Image (spheres, grey):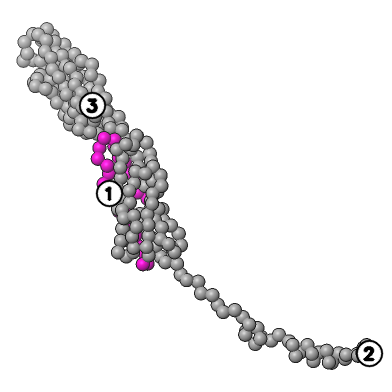
Amino acid sequence: MEPFQAVSARALLIGLSANAVTPESLACSAPAPVTVPERPYFNAEPRLIQFTGQRGTPPPEPRTVFLDGDRVEYRTSVIGRGFTTPSPRTGTLPTNDRVTLTFSTGALAAAIYEDQVILVAPGASQSIIVRVLLTVIDTPQLLVDQRPIVFRFPRGGALPAPRALYVTATAKPIHFEALIASETWVMINPGVAQIPANLRVEVDPRTLASGTYNGLIRVTAAEAANSPKEVPVTLIVD
């Protein structure tokens, strides 16, 4: 066995200096920088579409979603109630820069519905969601008090006081027309109005002989499913 040899402090320092880590040595061993590719730009507007549809009427007009972005391929899908159909289903920007949405509302009951049109472009930072909110209302129904309106006129007396006829409808305000069938002794005002409305019914019996006269008020509304409604009017001249 070799005898133990003492090492001086100066020799130890020289050995450490020979193996010291310098800035130059670190620079040589640093990894190369990593370049992250930029994701393609992809956008769509509008992001929210709202409209109201009425049962028994044609579906709403198609709506357009406009696309913008880099040259990317995209695809569309729909989740929700399923009343929305996008076209095209797939496309490439900038050639196919819009998506047309058509709607089918005929089988839906009166309620509020939502579809979500999802547009996905592979490589883009995120998918795009276009919300479609649909409110379906029932076909309006005319509501008219159809009880007979009776006037009595004693000869030489005062003219009968006017009567009120209230006209309204379900679902939404609609326009209507009130007409007198053929009699000239009964008048109604206004003849055309928007529901709800109070109609003023009057009679002028001064040129009539004694007797009983019957007339008819006909209320019509193009949007109402139960149009027309008829209200009998009777005038008794004593």
Q: Position of residue 58 (x, y in %)?
A: 24, 40
The kind of secondary structure element at disc 2 is loop
In the rendered view of the protein, which quadrant contains the N terminus? bottom right
The kind of secondary structure element at disc 1 is loop
Q: Which residue is mark 3?
A: 226
Q: Earlier in the sequence, mark 3 or mark 1?
A: 1
- Tell me the distance, in whole angstroms, between the alpha carbons under discs 3 and 2: 122 Å
Q: Which residue is mark 1?
A: 62
Image position of 160 with respect to 189: above or below: above
Image position of 184 with respect to 94: above or below: above
Residue at position x 92%, y 89% from top? 2
Q: Which residue is mark 2?
A: 3
The kind of secondary structure element at disc 3 is loop
Residue at position x 54%, y 75% from top? 34
Q: Which amino acid, by three-letter code, is at mark 3?
A: Asn
Residue at position x 8%, y 8% from top? 210
Q: Position of residue 30 (x, y in %)?
A: 61, 80
Q: Which amino acid, by three-letter code, is at mark 2?
A: Pro
- Tell me the distance, in whole angstroms, between the alpha carbons under discs 3 and 1: 29 Å
Q: Residue 6's quadrant in the figure?
A: bottom right
Q: Which mark is residue 214?
A: none
> In the drawing, does residue 73 fall left or right of residue 209?
right
Residue at position x 62%, y 85% from top? 28
* Span highlighted in magenta in the image: 48-71
Image position of 224 with respect to 63: above or below: above
Judge by depth and name the residue closer to the eye, 218 or 135.
135
Q: Are marks 2 and 1 in contact (CB under 8 Å)?
A: no
**Residue 58 belongs to the span the image colors magenta:** yes
Q: Residues within 10 Å of mark 2 (few under 14, many from 20)?
A: few
